[in-house]
Every structure is written in C-alpha cells, then in structure tokens.
Amino acid sequence: MAFSTEKSKLLYEGAKDSLLNGLASSLHKGPWQEYPIYLENAKGSRIYDVDGNEYIDYLMGLGPAILGYAPDSVNEAVASQILKGSQIAGPTADLIRLADKLIKIIPSAEKVATFLCSGSEANSFAIRLARAYTGRKKFVKFEGHYHGWLDEVKVSHFADSEAALGPRNNPWRLIHYAGQREPEDVITLPYNDLDVIEKTFKERGNEIAAVIMETVMFNAEPVFPKQGFLEGLRALTTKYGVVLIFDEVITGFRLALGGAQEYFGVTPDISTFAKAIAAGFPVSLVVGKKEIVGSSADSAGTFNGNPLVVAACLATIAELEKEGTYENLAKMTAAIADGVAKLGKKYGIKLMAHQIGSIWTLIFGTDEPLVDYRDHFKKVDKAMYQKMCRLSLENGVRLNPWRGRQYISTAHTMDDIERTLEILEPIFAQLK
C-alpha cells in the first residue's frame, strides 16, 4: 500500500495545543509512535484513516467491537431507540429484558447489581459490595492486573523493572501517578501462586473482603491461569469467607457468552462486564449472588441503564446467540494464531501465539507460557513486538500497539486472516 500519514501528523501537532498530550486516551498512541493515526471511519473488519489508508484491524476498539465496526443490527436497534429518546432517566421494559437475559447466560449472575458506563466504575462498585457484605476493608489484587483508572484500583499494574515490585512473596504496593492517593486497603500479590495467597489469608483473612482479578492477565503480555489455579482460588476464598470478583471487562462475551467463568468452569461471587457486551457502546455492569448484591445501596448515576446502550446490549446478545457464532469466531482466531506461530517457526523467531475464544495473543522472546507479571522482565522481547506493530501498520494491518492481545470479530473472514498472514510473512523475514 502507498503509506503516508502526513495528515495525521499535522492533526496531532494541532491537537497538542488544545488537548493534554494531544490525546483523549494514552492508549490511542503506541509507545513506538511519534504520533497517532487519525481515523476517518470504520466498518466491519476495516478502519480507514484521514490519509486514505485502509487497514485490516485487530484492535477492534480495544475489544468492544466483537461484531466488527458499525454492525447493522446494533445500529438499527440504537437508531430505533434514539427516536424514542436517548436519555430519559427512567427504567424501561427493555432494561428488565436485558437483566433477565444476563441472569440466564452468566453463571454468577443471580441478580444484576447495577448498570454503569465504564469498567473502572464497575470494579470499584464490586469492591464496595464485597466490603458491605463482609464488613472488612482490604482487598487483594495481583501484580500486573488492571482494574481501571480510579485511585484505589490503579495499583501495581505496571513497573519499570522487577526490582521495583519488591519481594515476590510480599510485593510492594506501587502507585503510578502524581496526585494519586495512597491505597492503604490494597494487598498486592503475585498471580498464579496459591501458596502465597493461602499464607496471606491465614495471616490476614479476617481483614480481607475480596480478591479481584482478571482470569487471564491481559493488561500486559497475556498470562494464563495455571491448571487448577482458578479452582484452587475459588476453594480458598470460600474457606476464608473472602468474596471472589472476576473482572470480565475484557473476557466478557469474548471467551464465551457467559464469559471466562463459563469458559473455565469456575463461578465467582461477583463479576464485572463491559467492552464487548454492547459491541462498541459505553456500558458496564455488576452481577453476582443475591445476598452479596443486596448488601449495599444501589448506585446512582445519570447514565445508568441508558436506553441506547440497553438496546445495543440486547442486539449484541441476539447476534452472539446465533448458532455457530462462537465456533466460527474460535475457528478464525485459531487460524491466525496458528499461522503466526508457523511463521515464527519458519523464520526461527522465538514467540508464543495462542488462541482463547475470540482473542489471539502474540509474545516475542519466549515459546513458553508466562507464569506471572514478573516473567515480562525476564522473557518478553517488547522491542521486537513494537517493531512488528510498526511494520504491520505500514503495510495495512493494525495490531494492538501496546501489548500482544488481538481481537477477532464476527465481521472478520478467513480471507482477512489469509491476507493478514501474507502481509506478515515478509515482515517476519525482516524481523529475522
């Protein structure tokens, strides 16, 4: 492709005068980019920038676009609701329909606690419910796991070095930004280590209200749960009366219609969902056991249960419930993960490509699964990944610019996958 992004560069220079760092989100520009790519429109599996470039996209709006960009069925449902009112500050029959549907498809959903607008809000509300139910204040989060940008949960989700994390069995609590409050009630622990968790529960279990976690650590290069880890954690939290919270902001609807809890067969006490549940519209929700959900007052928010996002959620679920949808998503996702793995083997590049649900992962520097966040400092070649992102973008494929987590949508086709692998092969030859 004739790749030029001069218009994007000019727009970015102007944006820096009026917008902090020239961006609405730091995730819109990769660490290897001088400036972001400004987009004109998106449809299906493709995005188009202001310079006229077309890309096969695997970022998918950072995950929400599980049906591809601008899916007709969701657009029609939302457009119909707009004519009835876009923000009416009152419940609707569709809201009840959605709550009933979620209870039916999500294993942990005995009752819906609330509808919100972002994953950050949902995770904070879930922690509040756990505190109300247990009467305890502290909660456990794992190193490298991300649960939003609010002060209390934005803790130890990244570090510049392994040494900055402190002792593995008793990690330091890292905060990341000037002005952030010291989160005194957070206990950070390494992921995938039941021994450390049980020791902590034995010593401090009467203080701990909850464990909040990503079932698969997707914040950095992906880390999967060890065999038996989720089951063991479920048993330990039950034994010590600690509420288990699954942050399914990324995995919800992505691994299965019932989320990671359905995929792995482990049911938490509370779950949070966002991103893919509305195919691109901003919504999040908290579900859980009836006695826990009912232990605290409901949330009050202007846009809670907004009818536009309710319509988007119902339309999204209707599409995902169609026969063969998840089988087709898994087939395409496996095809690209397997294709990338073969390219790595062909060109002698050590990497790990993996498929889980409609997410495929790519890590350079190792051909063995990572065990916890600390493995990133010992095994991962981030420089090679960033170089691949740059070369891919210049040749019409957009990958996640920050980490090796990529998404497939129902709008992708096997032709997209084959074309992507054709584009990637000479890039792998160059990387070698």
Image (cartoon, rainbow, N blue to C red):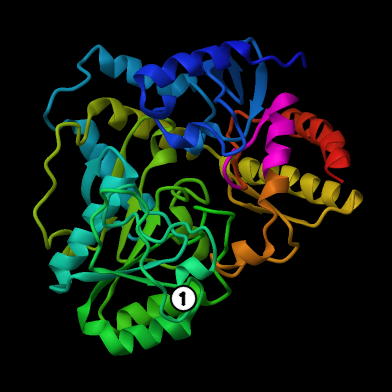
Query: Left or right: where does residue 419 sit relative to residue 227?
Result: right
Report if residue 391 lies within the magenta region.
yes
Residue 192 screen position, x and y as percent: 51, 73
Residue 381: quadrant of the picture: bottom right
Query: Left or right: where does residue 65 sit relative to residue 355?
Result: left
> What range is drawn magenta here?
386-403
Query: Left or right: where does residue 267 sit relative to residue 88?
Result: right
Query: Left or right: where does residue 239 sit relative to residue 392?
Result: left
Residue 431 screen position, x and y as percent: 83, 43
User: Is residue 111 visible to us here?
Assistant: no
Q: Amino acid at mark 1?
A: Glu
Label 1 neighbour load within 10 Å: few <14, some 14-19, many 20+: some
Label count reads: 1
Q: Residue at x 36, y 29 (%)?
A: 312
Q: Is residue 261 above or below residue 150?
A: below
Q: Nearer the viewer, residue 191 or 93?
A: 191
Image quadrant containing the N terminus: top right
Q: Residue at x 58, y 10 (%)?
A: 7
Q: Secondary structure at mark 1?
A: helix
Q: Nearer the viewer, residue 260 or 369?
A: 369
Q: Residue at x 37, y 82 (%)?
A: 236
Q: Is residue 13 above or below residue 91?
A: above
User: Would you name the residue on which mark 1 appears?
Assistant: 231
Q: Is residue 418 above or below residue 72?
A: below
Report if residue 124 lies within the magenta region.
no
User: Is residue 303 visible to us here?
Assistant: yes
Q: Residue at x 82, y 36 (%)?
A: 427
Q: Is residue 73 above or below residue 107?
A: above
Residue 417 screen position, x and y as percent: 74, 34
Q: Nearer the viewer, residue 176 or 217?
A: 176
Residue 242 screen position, x and y as percent: 27, 76
